[in-house]
Image: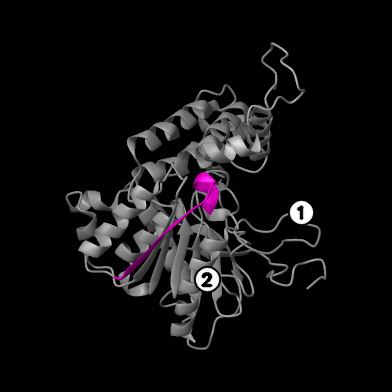
Amino acid sequence: MPESFPADSVGLVTPQTLHFDQPLELDSGRTLPAYDLVYETYGELNAARSNAVLICHALSGDHHAAGYHAPDDRKPGWWDTYIGPGKPIDTLQFFVVSLNNLGGCKGSTGPNTVDPGTGRPYGPDFPFVTVSDWVLSQARLADALGIEKWAAVIGGSLGGMQALQWTIDQPERIRHALVIAAAPKLTTQNIAFNEVARQAILSDPDFHEGHYYEAGVVPRRGLMLARMLGHITYLSEDSMRAKFGRELREGRLNFNFDVEFQIESYLRYQGRSFVDKFDANTYLLMTKALDYFDPAAAHDDDLAQALAGATARFLVISFTTDWRFSPARSREIVRALIRAGKQVSYAEIEAEHGHDAFLAPIPHYRAVFSNYMHRVAEEVA
């Protein structure tokens, strides 16, 4: 490993691709006849194949959770803070698998990949996918890797929803579920935010009803606005005030609609950079998967009943300033688990970062995370 990498980094990693010919029947009623999943692994699978951990990504995440793809990469994977030697998800103890979900735009089969039936990108013809669809595809990935049971399934935000769904759909294949900054279903307000983001994309003249690949364009303005809106909801008021306040970029008012406040500059930068690394059709799909997530719906809106068959133990974590998925929503999950007679630990972390706190290097969060994973490691040693 090059000396430029930190000692607690997993170092250079290479994504891998698995092709599946077994058709995947989706909740929407449609079927994917075949598909690819791109994933990365960190650490070594033990002889008993009992130390595997699955990382589930959030809305705009992907398979690159830790380490570097090249020696000159400026940034490591999106959860490198928590994955690596000696970190909470310790790669000296665990075999870690992180994948790009179906419908993603980083190599797994999705709108920007070629439909073998037409020879053109799927685009808007790619089927809607749900969290349950992802769990089924992830279970098939586990089969292909020879993993009968995960030591833990872990995720933040939409990733936490996947961890929760694993305990419902595949209860015999998961020992622990770490549900971080998540919710049992979206609030009406959250669905509203997602709809505004989608409309920004759908109304962009360059969207071409989702066929912008063939047109050789990208709905940049729509996707940029969607990301700007989303980013506002990921931050807390306190963190935005602490970072930017009402600071003027040039120290004075210019009385125009160009960038004047530092927060405006920051949001535009976030929006523009996102356009260069994410796909608009995927953004639409991912927000719909969020909207549709509601495991209690099939059980007369009783989450405890939905979780009745779960055999996993749970760690649920929330953050005080997360107003997108507030601590109250995590406590709903905890109360349901207690009513269902399940083993659950809960921590509410003081943090100023808002929803993005699950990605941040917060000492108390790290300690809770590490202590729980240490117990998981002792079980599979």
Q: Which residue is mark 1?
A: 74
| Residue 216 sits above or below residue 131 on the image | above
Q: Is residue 145 left or right of residue 81?
A: left
Colour scheme of the rendered structure: one colour
Placement of the N terminus among the 4 image quadrants: bottom right
Foreground label between 2 and 1? 2
Residue 345 within the segment the image draws in magenta: yes
- Residue 249 pos. (x, y %): 74, 26
Residue 183 within the segment the image draws in magenta: no
Classify mark 1: residues with Cα within 10 Å, few (<14), some (14-19) or many (20+). few
Q: Is residue 50 left or right of residue 332?
A: right
- Residue 111 pos. (x, y %): 53, 43
Q: Is residue 378 visible?
A: yes
Q: Which residue is mark 2?
A: 370
Specify the segment rendered in magenta.
Answer: 343-357
| Residue 328 sits above or below residue 53 on the image | above
Q: Please state which of residues 63 and 256 is positioned toward the viewer in this rendering.
A: 256
For mark 2, give the secondary structure: helix
Q: Is residue 260 left or right of residue 4?
A: left
Residue type highlighted by circle 2: Ser
For mark 1, give the secondary structure: loop
Q: Please state which of residues 78 and 145 is positioned toward the viewer in this rendering.
A: 78
Q: Is residue 253 left or right of residue 188?
A: right
Q: Please state which of residues 27 and 96 is positioned toward the viewer in this rendering.
A: 96
